[in-house]
Image (cartoon, coloured by chain):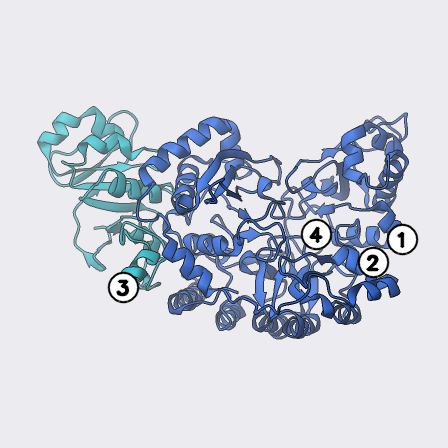
Chain colours: A cyan, B blue
Amino acid sequence: MEKVIKARRLVPDNWQLLEPAEGQAEVPAEGQVIVPLATWKAQRERLLARGNVGVVLEPHEDPAELAQDLGVLPLVAVNFPNFQDGRGYSTARLLRERYGYKGEVRAVGDVLRDELFYLSRVGFDAFALRADQDVEECLRAFDDFSEAYQASVERPLPLFRRRLLGV
Amino acid sequence: MYIYDEIDQRLVEERVAQFRGQVRRYLEGKLSLEEFLPLRLQNGLYKQRHAYMLRVAIPYGLLNTRQLRKLAHIARRYDKGYGHFSTRQNIQFNWPELEDVPDILAELATVQMHAIQTSGNCVRNVTTDQFAGVAPDEIVDSFVWCELIRQWSTFNPEFARLPRKFKIAVNGAKTDRAAVMVHDIGLHAVRAEDGTVGFRVIVGGGLGRTPIIGSVIREFLPWQHLLTYLDAILRVYNRYGRRDNKAKARIKILVRDRGPENFAREVEEEWAHLKDGPATLIPEEIERIEARFTRPQYEKLPERDPGLDALLERDKAFAAWYKRNVFGHKVPGYAAVTLSLKRTGVPPGDCTAEQMDAIADMADQYSYGELRVTHEQNLVLADVKQSDLYAVWQRARELGLATPNIGLLTNIICCPGGDFCSLANAKSIPIAQAIQERFDDLDYLYDIGELDLNISGCMNSCGHHHVGHIGILGVDKQGEEWYQVSIGGSQGNDAAIGKIIGRSFAKEEVPDVIEKLIHCYLAHREHEEERFIDTVRRIGLEPFKEYVYGKSDQGTPAGARQLATA
């Protein structure tokens, strides 16, 4: 089972991430699955009927493509094939702020301890750690900083407005 | 000087603790080299030719004397007794030990300093005009806007893993002294007819391998929208900037490939969603930031100090320094003084710990305890009483900081080059020294007049060679160091990229080449007021090529020399 952190705790998790395949991925009949965007688009009706389906976005994929479906998706994953590729940060913010997505936004792939603080601020609320990550170390990452200047998904008001409001 | 509040201070301290943990995990083998790399870079730590190099942020070039004394202390305790002021208005230490870096950062935090985002693929230290807040041609005090941008960019989570580094410059005066046309984003303050402050937004300028003059994507951005507009630009870049090729990953390539109009439209579309959102600036925040800046308590003085003219009359050396190194001030009776770090025989921008301490004493005595670092790698005392100028000059001279060469050929901008930097193709500091030695005669230097000579040791262009009136670039040819020369570049309001004159030169040839270019200029200039750059613009490259290469061999590779054009 994967190491998944939610709300600063390691939680049991049964979502299965389908690797993007040539042509159509074979979606198992049972269980919680996260499918590539192309699979979702090709088999949308069937997958809607099946239920227990989330979609994973690759760095170059536009969350606008999912905008119509966000109401029915319990989970959107954003893949980081390499932690230095920061496109997924914008993807998460757009999912939350532009498209108002309220379900789970999960970081998958090269999810490392030292990215967690930033990831948690742009709208991710679930973190499927890379297998080699030390969970205890990772749980500490959320406390690296106690404040932040910018507006973010986590705290929509920037510090300068919160200062004025005394919050 | 912006004075931290409790939160500013806490964030810097938390950053030190975070990096201490990262260094520990790296040394314990829990972080791979590849994973540690961006973490150390975003804390200013590079690996250089001989050792680590730590680049400490001097936000928008502004320093107080407590900070400068701390830098001197760090130079002595952790380094070899000196630091190098860079063209990004930062300071670099070339010899720290990795294990010491968390302690160095902790020491910096005690004086409200840090090395946050001085490197790596993120928004870097914002730079500005070294005369911000005192310039007679001021539109706005750019420091306030720079500090706003500093806070916006510090640990900005969405833009922490950009395709490539990202540099923002703000210019608050009529004259551009912040090189806004050659930054990833340049912001040029504008005042609308009704007095509203805003910014002209320039995107996609830059030097490096592909020098490009930036494109104006918005003529007037009202100040309230500054941060949301930056968010929009950065988001477009973060999502669509190239990540497959490091050499094509800067925003300038994205702007060029899409065309400035299309890029501007994309930004405006993105901005339409962010405009008037919570990140929209409010007057209370501008006032709060303004109020956290220390301000000199200026005395009421006559426009011109009554004793100054007599001193200028009496002392020619003082007059020469005054002419070159003293800048006007918006407050009557005051002046801004440039302390030159370009003395012949000293690497440009280098400053010893002893000099730093002595400069701190000078700034305390004569300039309200503050100073600035310029992107030309000099230091500025910005608030000197005219009546103190003579004393300041005498002291600066004792310290070797009074070379009266600001704006002249020997005020060379120069990167650390192959002596230190692992990226460099060639050494740059010895070239600067050889040129400075050749042009050591001040009378000759004054006759030549204003001339920017910039040297970079490689295509990364840290020495800004593209925008030098004369630019020199170190190139590698079959493992040997050669130098390519360009002319006609300029920074400022009429920014331009220099053109290469022809095949490159061996190290020993460079001073001769510069001298030939100068001879050509002196022979062709129409009057003494015509600067080198004006002559280049008027007559073009050809006459200069003839002086350098001779008529038969106008820079073509077929000449007697064995080299091809670089």
Mark 3 or mark 4: which is in front? 3
Foreground residue among B68 and B427: B68
* Residue highlighted by disc 3: A166
* Residue highlighted by disc 1: B443
Q: Secondary structure at mark 1?
A: helix
Tell me: B165 left or right of B557.
Answer: left
Residues marked 3 and 4, same chain? no
**Which callout, 4 or 2, points at the residue further toward the start of the chain?**
2
Tell me if label 1 and label 3 are in contact, CB under 8 Å: no
**Which callout, 1 or 4, points at the residue further toward the start of the chain?**
4
Mark 2 or mark 1: which is in front? 2
**Which callout, 2 or 1, points at the residue further toward the start of the chain?**
2
Question: Residue shown at 15%/36% (left/top)?
Answer: A71
Return the x and y of residue A7 as percentages of the image width and height: 21, 57
Q: How many marks?
A: 4
User: For residue B418, which numbered disc appears in the image?
Assistant: 4
Tell me: B395 left or right of B134.
Answer: right
Q: Residues within 10 Å of mark 4 (few under 14, many from 20)?
A: many
* Residue highlighted by disc 2: B320
Q: Is residue A104 above or below residue B42?
A: above
Residues marked 1 and 3, same chain? no
Under mark 4, the amino acid is Gly
Mark 1 or mark 4: which is in front? 1
Q: State how far apart marks 2 and 3 are (Cα).
A: 55 Å
Under mark 1, the amino acid is Asp
Q: Residues within 10 Å of mark 1 (few under 14, many from 20)?
A: few
Q: State how far apart marks 3 and 4 are (Cα).
A: 52 Å
Q: Secondary structure at mark 3?
A: loop
Q: Pinpoint the chain carrying mark 4.
A: B
Q: State how far apart marks 1 and 4 are (Cα).
A: 32 Å
Under mark 2, the amino acid is Ala
Q: Residues within 10 Å of mark 2 (few under 14, many from 20)?
A: some
